[in-house]
Each structure stands twice: as C-alpha cells, then as structure tokens.
Image (cartoon, grey):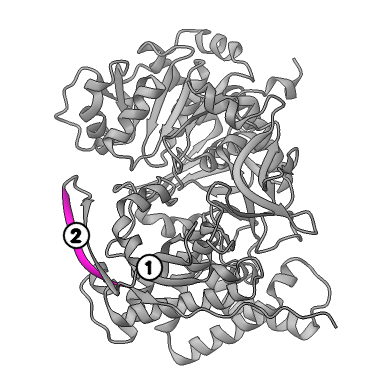
C-alpha cells in the first residue's frame, strides 16, 4: 500500500510518527512544576497499552468512550486508543453539570468513561444509576480516590498492559478512513446540543490543508489549554499534531495557563478573543501602575507601532527608514519584553475565532509583530471555512475561503459552504442532518454574511437573530454586542430591539478592569454586585455605550440601531445558571425569558427595576440574589446627512 494512502486514520498516523520521528517530543505535561516529555515512540506504546486495557474491559468496534477532564496526555491518548479498537471517543466539557453530562451519556450511549480526577468521578457516580449502558469509569489522577470501592471504578494504571500478539495490529488494519473518528457535541446556543459525527477523512483533510496553509511542521509547538470537547482543540491539539508531528503541551492547570504559556513559548497559538482581551487588559492595568518614565516610553513606542507595526509585519512598502529603525529600537525596549511577558515571543502563526475581536485589540497584537489572524469555522466543518492568508489580514473580515472550501451566500444572506471536512451526520438526528446539510453537500451555517470587494467573508450575525426595528432599521444583536464588548470594561452584553421601537441592552461589567479603574479613582466596593451598582460605574459604561453609538451613527444601515437605554446586571451571566453555553455564547432566548421583567422595564418609563434571581454556587448549592437595578439613558447621535443631488 502506498505510504500516503496508508496514513488515512489516526492510529496509523500515530504508528507512522513513532517510526519516522521516535525521539521527537509528541506531548509535554507540566506536573508539580516540572515539564515531563513523552516522545512519539513512548506515546505509541502508551496508547497501545491503553487500547489493550479498554479491550480487556469489553470495549469493541462501534462502542462509544466518554472523555471528561482538563487537557491531559492520557485523555488525548484515550481518544486514539478508542479509535484503535474501532470505537468512537466522545469528549465532554469538564465544567458541565452532572445532569448535563447525564444527558450526553444517555444520548451517546456511552459504555466506558475515562475521566481526569475525583471531581469528574463524583459527577458520574451521581448519575450512573440513570445510565445503564455505562459499565466502567476509569480515572487518571488517583488523588482523593483511596476510599472509593465501587467495582466498576478503577485507575488507568490498574488496567492490564500486556497485549495479545497481533490483536491491535489487526484492529488498526480494519479501520477505514470513512469511519467516524469522534463525536463532538455542539454548544447548544439555539437548543439541545447535537452530536456531530466527524470521520477520519474529514479531520485529516482539514488538518492537512490547514497545516499546509500555514507551513506547520514537526518543530512547531502548541499549548493545549482549550476544552477538549471543542472542535478547535481537537483539530489543533490532536489532528494537526498527528499530521505534522509537532508537540502539544498541556498546562499544569487552568490557573497556571499564563505562566505555562510563557515557559513554553508556542510557535502556533489559538485563543478566542476574550483571552486576547484579558491579556491586553492586564497589560494596560500594569502600565497604569508603572512609573512615569516607563509609562511614557510604552505609550510613545505603542503609538509608533500602531502607525507602522502592521505594515512592517506584512512587509508592505512605504515605511520610512527612520520608522523602521525606531521600530527596531522599540522591539528591544518595549515590544520584545512585552511579547515575552505575554508568552507570545515565538508565535509564528496565531489565530482567533469564535467571536468578533475588537479592531483596536487585533491591531495591538499585530503592531507588536505577532502574526495574529482570524478564521471562521464550525464543528460541522472540522473547523476551517474561511482563513486569512499572510499579508491579507483585515480586522473586520475572516478572510477568503479556506483551501478546499467553497462558500456561497444564499438569497437571504445566509453563508453556506462545502468541503472535504464536512461532517458525516448528527448522531441519532437525521431530521437535523437533513435540515443542515443538503443532498449535494452544502452546509447551512445559520450565519448571515457577505463578501467584501476583495473576496473576504464578513460575518454579521446569526441569520435567525437578524431582525428589524419597528421603523424598518436593521437589527443585528450580536454585531452590537461585539461592538460593546470591544470596551475593556464590558465583559458581556445582550441587546434587544427586534420588532421594538428602539434598542436596549443588558451589560455585565468586567470585574477586573472596572475594579482596577475603581481603585485608581478611590472608589471602594465589596464585590461584583456592589461595584455594578455604583453611579460612577454607570457613568463609565454610559460613556462606552455612547462611543459605540457615535460609531453606529456613521453606518447607514445600522445608524437607527443605537442603544437608547441600558442596565448593568447584578450578577455575571453564567454557564451554571443556563445563561451561557459551555463556549460562553449567550443563550438569548433563555435570558429573554428569565429576565422578562427587566426587558419590559427597559421599554417603559421606569428608572429602576427590582429583580430577584436564583443562582447556583460552585459547591452545588442554590440561592437568590436580589437588587434594584437603575436604568440609564444613553445619548444617541443623528444619522449621517444625505446629500441632495446638485
């Protein structure tokens, strides 16, 4: 069999990497403050041992394996071990509540679960009686597990490791490229999560085209810190790792990610906009506390970077020699040390996606010489739909179609695509599959967008969320919310206005950024609710909203969508309270129903509204938070004047 044709499943790729680069690092994990490296040869042996252990427990072709926990090498190995046996791994979000996990265990017909630690074991024990197909629970970290005596529960280290000669090789040989490689559940923004079945061929096609697009190779490094249940992590940390042979690095914990990022210095890095926003907020907060000389030096060189940095990064002509020399000096004095502190000094290719990123934030990183780009993707596409090529990067688009992808815009403005990465089907949901994927392979994204004159795709909003005000003005809530969240002081926003006479909004403040602002202005506060209720904070947010309104006034289509009234919620929107998905997307319908009284108050003449909300605490207890929320009027600006014909 031809070598290229043979490498059509992940187990075969693993064995190939173990042969051609046995001593190259495949994965690293930080444990007790020390990075532990596993080579490709070692990883292949560990995956085989784990696959044999699963087979001894009765796991077989067609079975489904749940994987729940933080990014850990053994959990990634469990993915490939299941695939070796012809089974299907089903990663789940580690912070999902027990009942959410129960629904997925039942729907996916899970027979064995591999979890990280005691927290995940306790979650499964709570619901196991309702999941009769779940026969075994295996855990990685034994801490706290000494007194657990359930017969169906055991540590991964307790599994048998000595495989029967030829057994796994036979199983691997039976694998086909069109076998389902993984089931990834959607975030459930618009309803119940759907299990997206993606084949080896889908993932390998997308991973290879993405790697070729950015010239990734075995010498690249990535930090694997995003949820394993998310398709982005599955493609970047698993599929592309196997395709290129580069090293995936698992941080010690979610609390140490920034420290571990600095230590590893990845060359290939992905983060959603909120991560880049938080990093920039930290930088600006620290600079406000710096000495006068450092502060002035920072602001002067950042002014230079904003003016010429992106052009130098793109190797564009027209940058004066003096500016180039000053930029090099800035790289020594400011940009280099700053990139090092952020852990981005070695980034050769960086991506952000999932939400719109603020133009100022995007330009900040690119002006430092960091090759940050945007992409547009979906679980159903094995990530890649549109990508920005080097030298063709815009802050307000997601680039042209990715390699091998066709994109077209439907008559109603919805974006459709077709590619080799398109998913097989939704698990046990033929109706949704038929609704999403046409007979000739086109997939409905549910997003509204259009191509700019350069052929770059611009996403406006979810197609179903785009509506009209009573006067006919276009209303795109997500677009408005993203505009608001470009402010460092606004963490989350929910806009209302469809079939209403004006736009109003809920606001969640960013406790860290607003807290720092409050300290600088000698404003004491005791917590989120107290800070959010301060009149000075309302004035601060009012200024932010009015800046957005001023920008909207210049947009002919959206000038009428300026925000007239707003309130600051007394609590942060939370996944545990059902207000956000696990990927932190707003569940608009749920929020509208839960806070109906607040919405009606915004559209009345009320100046405040009392609200009492039930919340879930981290320890599982429930309680209520009550507050009287002020409603604030924001200034709006006139539409641009229409010139009359001469």
Circle 1 sits on which residue?
510
Which residue sits furthest right?
646
User: Residue 565 in the image: x percent, y percent?
Assistant: 41, 72
- What's the residue at 20%, 73% (across, down)? 526
Secondary element under disc 2, as helix, strand or loop, is: strand
Q: Quadrant of the C terminus?
A: bottom right
Residue 245 visible in rendering: no
- What's the residue at 37%, 56% (across, down)? 256
- Looking at the rendered structure, which numbered label has been put on residue 370? none
- Magenta highlight range: 622-630
Q: Is residue 339 above or below residue 288?
A: above
In magenta segment, residue 623 = yes
Which residue sits furthest bottom?
292
Could you tell me if the residues under marks 2 and 1 are in contact, i.e. CB atoms within 8 Å? no
- What's the residue at 59%, 38% (across, down)? 241
Q: Is residue 527 above or below residue 152?
A: below
Secondary element under disc 1, as helix, strand or loop, is: loop
User: Residue 88 in the image: x percent, y percent?
Assistant: 48, 22
Which numbered disc, 2 or 1, marks the residue that appears first in the sequence? Answer: 1
User: Residue 212 in the image: x percent, y percent?
Assistant: 73, 42
Q: Quadrant of the N terminus?
A: top right
Quick one: 186 or 284, which is closer to the camera?
A: 186
User: Residue 465 in the image: x percent, y percent?
Assistant: 52, 50
In magenta segment, residue 269 = no
- What's the residue at 33%, 19% (across, down)? 159
- Looking at the rendered structure, which numbered label has been put on residue 625? 2
Q: Nearer the viewer, mark 2 or mark 1?
A: 2
* 3D distance between C-alphas at marks 2 and 1: 19 Å
């Amino acid at each position: 069999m031809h070598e290229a044709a043979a490498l059509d499943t992940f187990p075969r790729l693993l064995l190939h990497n173990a042969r051609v680069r046995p001593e190259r690092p495949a994965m690293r994990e930080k444990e007790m403050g020390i990075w532990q490296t596993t080579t490709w040869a070692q990883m292949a042996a560990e995956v085989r041992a784990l696959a044999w252990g699963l087979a001894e427990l009765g796991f077989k072709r067609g079975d489904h394996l749940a994987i729940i926990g933080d990014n850990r090498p053994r959990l990634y190995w469990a993915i490939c071990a299941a695939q070796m046996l012809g089974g299907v791994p089903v990663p789940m979000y580690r912070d999902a509540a027990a009942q959410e996990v129960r629904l997925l265990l039942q729907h996916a017909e899970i027979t064995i679960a591999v979890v990280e630690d005691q927290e995940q074991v306790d979650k499964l024990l709570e619901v196991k009686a309702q999941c009769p197909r779940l026969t075994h629970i295996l855990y990685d970290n034994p801490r706290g597990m000494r007194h657990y005596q359930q017969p169906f529960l055991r540590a991964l280290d307790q599994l048998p490791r000595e495989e029967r000669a030829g057994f796994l090789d036979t199983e691997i040989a039976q694998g086909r490229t069109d076998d389902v490689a993984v089931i990834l559940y959607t975030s459930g923004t618009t309803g119940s999560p759907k299990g997206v079945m993606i084949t080896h061929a889908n993932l390998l096609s997308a991973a290879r085209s993405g790697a070729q697009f950015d010239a990734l190779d075995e010498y690249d490094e990535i930090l694997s810190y995003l949820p394993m249940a998310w398709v982005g992590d599955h493609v970047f940390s698993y599929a592309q790792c196997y395709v290129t042979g580069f090293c995936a690095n698992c941080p010690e914990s979610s609390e140490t990610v920034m420290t571990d990022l600095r230590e590893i210095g990845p060359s290939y890095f992905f983060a959603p906009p909120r991560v880049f926003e938080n990093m920039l907020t930290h930088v600006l907060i620290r600079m406000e506390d710096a000495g006068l000389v450092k502060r002035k030096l920072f602001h002067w060189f950042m002014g230079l970077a904003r003016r010429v940095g992106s052009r130098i990064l793109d190797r564009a002509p027209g940058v004066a020699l003096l500016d180039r020399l000053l930029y090099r000096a800035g790289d020594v004095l400011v940009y280099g040390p700053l990139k090092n502190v952020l852990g981005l000094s070695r980034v050769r290719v960086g991506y952000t996606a999932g939400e719109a990123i603020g133009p100022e934030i995007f330009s900040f990183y690119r002006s430092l010489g960091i090759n940050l780009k945007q992409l547009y993707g979906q679980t159903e596409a094995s990530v890649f739909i549109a990508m920005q090529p080097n030298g063709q990067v815009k802050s307000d688009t997601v680039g042209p179609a990715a390699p091998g992808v066709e994109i077209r815009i439907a008559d109603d403005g919805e974006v459709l695509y077709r590619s080799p990465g398109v998913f097989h089907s939704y698990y046990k949901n033929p109706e949704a599959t038929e609704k999403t994927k046409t007979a000739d392979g086109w997939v409905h994204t549910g997003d509204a967008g259009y191509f700019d004159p350069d052929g770059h795709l611009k996403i406006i909003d979810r197609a179903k969320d785009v509506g009209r005000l009573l006067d006919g003005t276009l209303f795109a809530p997500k677009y408005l919310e993203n505009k608001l969240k470009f402010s460092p002081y606004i963490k989350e926003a929910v806009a209302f206005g469809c079939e209403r006479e004006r736009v109003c909004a809920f606001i969640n403040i960013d406790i860290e950024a607003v807290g720092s602002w409050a300290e600088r202005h000698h404003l004491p506060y005791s917590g989120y609710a107290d800070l959010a209720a301060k009149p000075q904070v309302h004035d601060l947010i009012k200024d932010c909203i009015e800046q957005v309104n001023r920008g909207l006034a210049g947009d002919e289509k959206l000038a009428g969508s300026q925000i007239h009234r707003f309130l600051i919620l007394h609590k942060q929107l939370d996944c545990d309270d059902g207000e956000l998905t696990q990927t932190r997307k707003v569940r608009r319908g749920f929020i509208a129903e839960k806070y109906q009284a607040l919405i009606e108050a915004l559209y009345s003449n009320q100046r405040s509204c009392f609200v009492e909300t039930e919340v879930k605490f981290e320890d599982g207890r429930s309680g209520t938070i009550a507050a009287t929320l002020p409603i604030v009027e924001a200034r709006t600006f006139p539409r641009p004047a229409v010139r009359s014909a001469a």
